[in-house]
Image: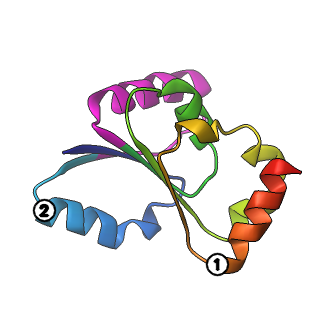
Amino acid sequence: MKVTIVTLMPSFLGNITKTLKEEGHEYRVFMPTGDNTKDFWKLSEDCHWADLIFCEFCQHPMEVVTNLVKDKPIVARMHRIEAYNPGFLKQVSWGNVDCLLITTSHIKDYFNKACTG
């Protein structure tokens, strides 16, 4: 399987990339550079290449991914910090996210409230 990992913090990827490699999967890591035009084209290319997109952290550019990709599974991992940004969370097309992993149980209620309230 080919996986594109979208992240702002690659330090959180150690076990994920290690396991993907051990299991024989290919992966690319996309990190925004700050050049929005180049980032958009690189992100588009990486998402087109992949069989699955994994967003580590529910932060920018996840909203771009969920509005761009409609034909591939998107998996996202939410840590505590993202739940406290309801303005950003409302920019994400959650209907295009196939699996949301929430790292702490109390954040689930806060997330639900932020996205519906």
Residue 54 lies left or right of residue 23; in this view the side is right
Is residue 6 covered in magenta? no
Dividing the picture into quarters, in which one does residue 82 lie? bottom right
Q: Residue at x 28, y 29 (%)?
A: 49
Q: Which residue is mark 2?
A: 23
Q: Position of residue 12 (x, y in %)?
A: 45, 69
Q: Residue furthest right?
A: 117
**Label located before the other in sequence (2 or 1):** 2
| Element type at mark 1 | helix
Q: Position of residue 37 (x, y in %)?
A: 56, 21
Q: Position of residue 78 (x, y in %)?
A: 59, 62
Residue 27 lies left or right of residue 32; in this view the side is left
State how many labels appear.
2
For disc 1, the neighbor class at 10 Å (few under 14, some 14 to 19, many from 20) is few
Q: Position of residue 10 (x, y in %)?
A: 44, 61
Q: Is residue 61 visible?
A: no
> Whole-Å distance between the Cαs marked 2 and 1?
29 Å
Q: Residue at x 83, y 46 (%)?
A: 87
| Element type at mark 2 | loop
Q: Which residue is mark 1?
A: 105
Q: State the quadrant of the N terminus.
A: top left
Q: Residue at x 43, y 25 (%)?
A: 44
2 or 1: mark nearer the eye: 1
Residue sitting nearer the eye, 34 or 67: 67
Residue sitting nearer the eye, 89 or 37: 89
What is the magenta range? Answer: 28-52
Q: How are the residues colored?
A: rainbow
